[in-house]
Image: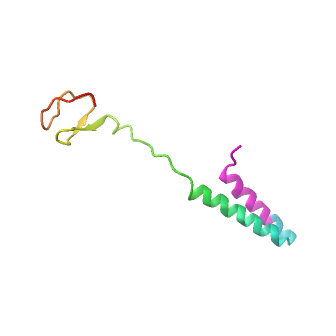
Amino acid sequence: MKISPWTYLLIGVLISIISFFMKLKFFIWLGIAMAVFGGISLFILRAKPKKEDPKYAQYAICPYCAATIRRTDKFCWKCGKKLRNI
């Protein structure tokens, strides 16, 4: 079971707050450590997926002259060469 970084962050903050009012120093530091770990894994370590823009998915590069062409073109508009299936 994978635990969300938000869970670590929330539990760490709750443990810190409760421990602060109960004067339990060890648990304050434990809560702070959990909150920091949750924050680091949430904002720094998480890999953000790259979204490919569908507007550019219909375009390709001509292998002969490097012009931008549509994937459905049969001939390059710039150099006039016949294109394979791109």
Figure check: 5 above or below 54: below
Label count reads 0
Which quadrant of the figure contains the C terminus?
top left
Magenta-drawn stretch, dominant element (helix, strand or loop): helix
Whether the magenta-drawn stretch holds residue 78 is answered as: no
**What's the residue at 20%, 42% (across, down)?**
66
Colour setup of the view: rainbow
- Camera-side residue: 67 or 23? 67
Q: Quadrant of residue 24?
A: bottom right
Residue 51 location, x and y as percent? 44, 43
Which residue corresponds to the image point at 71% horizontal and 61% vertical from the top-left?
Answer: 34
In front here: 56 or 29? 29
Does residue 22 lie above or below 64 as drawn? Answer: below
- Give the magenta-colored segment's residue range: 1-17
36 left or right of 76 in image = right
Q: Can you say whether 54 is above or below 17 in the image?
A: above
Q: Residue at x 71, y 52 (%)?
A: 7
Residue 25 in picture, x, y percent from top left: 82, 72
Residue 55, given in percent of the width and then of the height, sits at 35, 38
Rendering quarter of residue 15? bottom right
Q: Is residue 54 left or right of residue 82?
A: right
Image quadrant for the N terminus?
top right
